[in-house]
Image (cartoon, grey):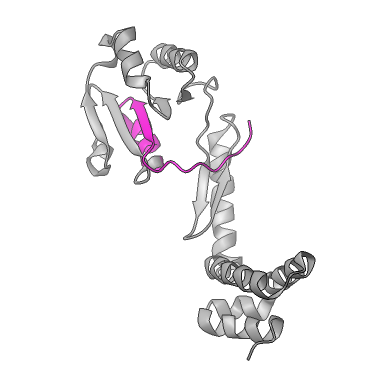
Amino acid sequence: MIPLMIDCTNRQIVIFGGGQVGARKASYFIPMADVTVYSRTFCDSFDTLAVQKEYVTVTDLTREDLIGIITGAFLVITATSDPDLNSDITALCRSLEVLVNNADKEEGDVFLPSRIHGDDYCIAISTCGSSPAVSRFVRYHLEDYIRTSLPYLDPMIHLQKRLRTRLKETITDQVKRKQIIWQVLCDTEVQEMLCVDEGAAWHMVSGRYLHEA
């Protein structure tokens, strides 16, 4: 398994199962992807989720029905209460070369990690299905660390994006650009100012590292 960041905008995500697990999986992709959920019943958590609900008894679907649903999907998630049914759908997805996440077992192609995200960053934590509890445990600790020790993380990303653009316009030496970027990132005065005033932080960087008035 290798980690990837994938743009799921307008991708078709198909979920089999309308219980809490299915709802949790659906919320992972909303609002970016188009999510369709197939189930006989839906738990209350779906009331607030912007998904397309298809009321069907999944066990009554024929192989041809399933192929019709799965074909064209970017990712299929099996989250019914029947492990054998989940495995059967997983095997069918693999035969059709469609990515699949099996909520029951580790035989799927995709694992959904725990996530920490701000406006402009995303950190993913996964044990590849071995222990979701450990992923959550690590996430809680990292969230606390970011909140207490890196409160400037999002504004620093904004500043770094602006800085990289300016450096490419003014400095041709790539090594020098990298040095400045790292120095700014580690500058504690810049970090502290970002928590107060992003404009003032940029002014500080401009004078200190770009030698601009």
Instruction: Determine whether 6 is above or below 149 in the image.
Output: above
Q: What count of labels does the image hold?
A: 0
Judge left or right: residue 208 versus residue 34: right
Residue 104 forms part of the magenta stretch: no
Residue 74 spot, x, y in % from top left? 42, 30
Q: Quadrant of residue 208?
A: bottom right
Judge left or right: residue 110 versus residue 212: left
Judge left or right: residue 115 versus residue 190: left
Residue 2 forms part of the magenta stretch: yes
Point 52% across, 29% down: residue:
110
Residue 205 spot, x, y in % from top left? 64, 81
| Res 121 visible | yes
- Residue at the limit of the structure toward the bottom, as seen here: 213
Q: In which quarter of the image is residue 210?
A: bottom right
Check the picture and name the quadrant holding the N terminus: top right
Residue 15 spot, x, y in % from top left? 35, 27
Residue 73 spot, x, y in % from top left? 38, 27
Point 43% across, 41% down: residue:
8
Point 54% across, 25% down: residue:
109
Decide which of 130, 169 is in the foreground and name it.
169
Point 51% across, 21% down: residue:
105
Decide which of 61, 208 is in the foreground and name it.
208
Check the picture and name the quadrant holding the C terminus: bottom right
| Res 197 visible | no
Decide which of 83, 39 is in the foreground and name it.
39
Q: What stretch is highlighted in magenta?
A: 1-28
Instruction: Determine whether 20 is above or below 138 in the image.
Output: above
Instruction: Determine whether 208 is above or below 133 in the image.
Output: below
